Amino acid sequence: MSNFINIGIPSKGRLKKDVLKIFYKKKLKLISERGERDLIGSIKNKPNIKILYLHAREILERLGDGSLDIGFSGFDLFKESAVNNQNKINIESKLNFGNADLVVAIPDPWIDVQTIADLEEIAFEFRDKKKKRLRVATKYPNLTRDFLFSKGVTQFKLVDSLGATEAYPFTGSAELITDITSTGETLKANNLRVLKDGKILKSQACIFTSKKNNKKKGLKNLVRLLSK
């Protein structure tokens, strides 16, 4: 089995569609026995390659533990994963899709808050007057914590977002959010705006490989073909 090359492809969404286009352009015909919903596939006439359709976050976990050899995922999710996991993964190439920014967004009515420094003031006010911490809803706790700490904002509490993060401030579950956005339209539609210096990270889709399995036969050529 060790001469098999396992490739992880996101199992849903825009990222999946864009990744599938790469295979189509390279004339690599993907086959799934049970059709669209199958989570395991192969490539026609390439018996040593196995395709696994996984959540984009799980792809990075699997690259880290070596059960995937090649994976497509977002740079944001790579940077959010544990540092010891990042150290086990190579970024082979950045792709020209999946472009988005991870940002700090606040409710529109907070007219006095334009920058991170203003946010810091509000955070202290909350602590002193309301005896509670500002709550930040996010699916990116590590990146959010590091960014806010690096800007001197320390009086906050992270709330794990399990769904549509932009709804949290208006359901009373959090005061502000950090979220990934490509156009900013969803934030605007939810009466949120990005702080002027609130960009945490610029992201795009990437091809990653597992350092553990980097010497596998045919792997380098396959990465080169998919990266072109």
Image (cartoon, grey):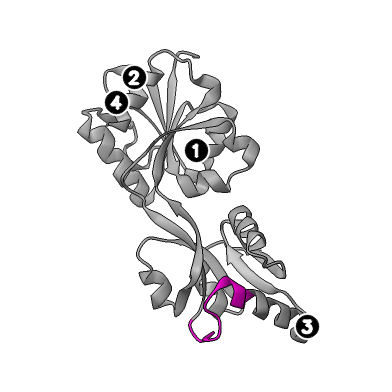
Q: CA distance from mark 4 to mark 3?
A: 58 Å
Q: Residue at x 36, y 71 (%)?
A: 185
Residue 59 disc label: 1
Is residue 173 at least partly visible in the picture?
no
Name which quarter of the figure residue 51 lies in: top left
Horizontal side of 154 relative to 175 (left or right) equals right
Q: Which mark is residue 225?
A: 4
Q: Is residue 175 left or right of residue 47?
A: right
Marks 2 and 1, how far apart at CA: 21 Å
Label 2 neighbourhood size at 10 Å, few (<14), some (14-19), many (20+)? few
Please name the amino acid that badge 3 sits on: Asp
Q: Quadrant of the C terminus?
A: top left
Q: Which residue is found at the position 39% from the left and 44% from the top?
A: 205
Q: Are marks 2 and 4 in contact (CB under 8 Å)?
A: yes
Residue 221 badge: 2
**Residue numbers of the magenta segment:** 108-119
Q: Where is residue 107 shown, x and y percent of the image?
A: 51, 80
Does dot 4 land on a helix, a strand or a loop? Answer: helix
Residue that badge 3 annotates: 128
Q: Dot 2: what SS? A: helix
Decide which of 139, 128 is in the foreground and name it: 128
For marks 3 and 1, give the CA distance.
43 Å
Distance (Cα) linking label 2 and label 4: 6 Å
